[in-house]
Image: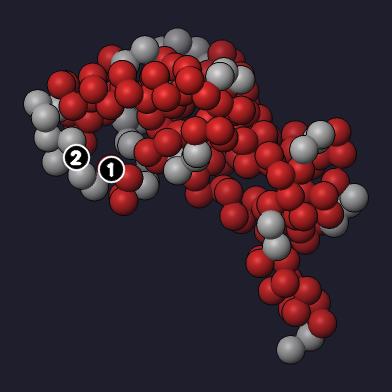
Amino acid sequence: MESSDVGADVLTLASDGLLAGRAADGDDRAFAVLLRRHSPVLRAYVNRLTRRPSDADDVLQEVALTAWKALPQLQNPDSVKAWLFRIAERQAFAMLRRQPQTAEIDEELPSAEDSLARFDDRDQLRSALSRLPAQQARVWVLREVGGLSYDEIAETLAVPQSTVRGALALARKRLLDAMGGTA
């Protein structure tokens, strides 16, 4: 095994904070590991926000460029996951603002099978999610699809943890009601 392969293996085991610190110092391999680690859940989140999976690649590319440039200013490298979600959300909303209102919307849900498997009817879930207030829907998606902790969601949305807990409880109740108690 070459020494570069060993280095790459070690990086995959490193914490987000260590990777973010190394990437901030210009280590592109550490940055690539961070992106590989968090891209699937970021893609699911962006898909949910834009409702256009075809836009996910464009948004994630912008997230990578923005993050690479801004990493040296990241105050707390251990919070890089929440920071990436904030960037993804801003980029997704920026893309939505640039698109004409008549753009065709792809209604596919994120490919997070485990998070959504407990719902029997995806169309019903999709409809119920679309009727939630925006903050409740974002909190639910970040928790159930993204697997973020309450602290990470609070940091991502720049709200207190108590707001996250309340919004998630309301979202879950409304989804259960809308799904006829099948969730």
Horizontal relation, residue 76 to residue 40: left or right: right
Q: In this rendered view, identify the residue nearer to me: 30 or 168.
A: 168
Q: Residues within 10 Å of mark 1 (few under 14, many from 20)?
A: some
The quarter of the rendered structure image containing the C terminus is top left
Query: Which residue, given by chain and number where applicable, does mark 1 sit on?
Result: 116
Q: Residue at x 28, y 26 (%)?
A: 172
Q: Residue at x 19, y 40 (%)?
A: 119
Q: Amino acid at mark 2?
A: Phe
Give the color scheme: rainbow, by chain, secondary structure or one colour: secondary structure
Q: Looking at this view, name the residue that lies furthest to the left.
A: 180
Do the CB atoms of the residues marked 2 and 1 lie less than 8 Å apart? yes
Instruction: Report whether residue 77 is seen.
Output: yes
Could you say whether the residue bearing mark 2 is in a helix, strand or loop? loop
Q: Amino acid at mark 1?
A: Leu
Horizontal relation, residue 134 to residue 5: left or right: left
Residue 109 place in picture, x, y as percent: 33, 37
Residue 20 place in picture, x, y as percent: 77, 49
Horizontal relation, residue 73 to residue 96: left or right: right
On residue 119, which mark appears?
A: 2
The quarter of the rendered structure image containing the N terminus is bottom right
Q: Residues within 10 Å of mark 2 (few under 14, many from 20)?
A: some
Instruction: Report whether residue 65 is seen.
Output: no
Relative to residue 116, is residue 135 depicted above or below? above
Relative to residue 74, is residue 38 depicted above or below? below
Q: Residue at x 50, y 49 (%)?
A: 40
Could you say whether the residue bearing mark 1 is in a helix, strand or loop? helix
Q: Residue at x 37, y 38 (%)?
A: 144
Task: Tell me how far mark 2 sits from mark 1, CA to CA.
Answer: 6 Å
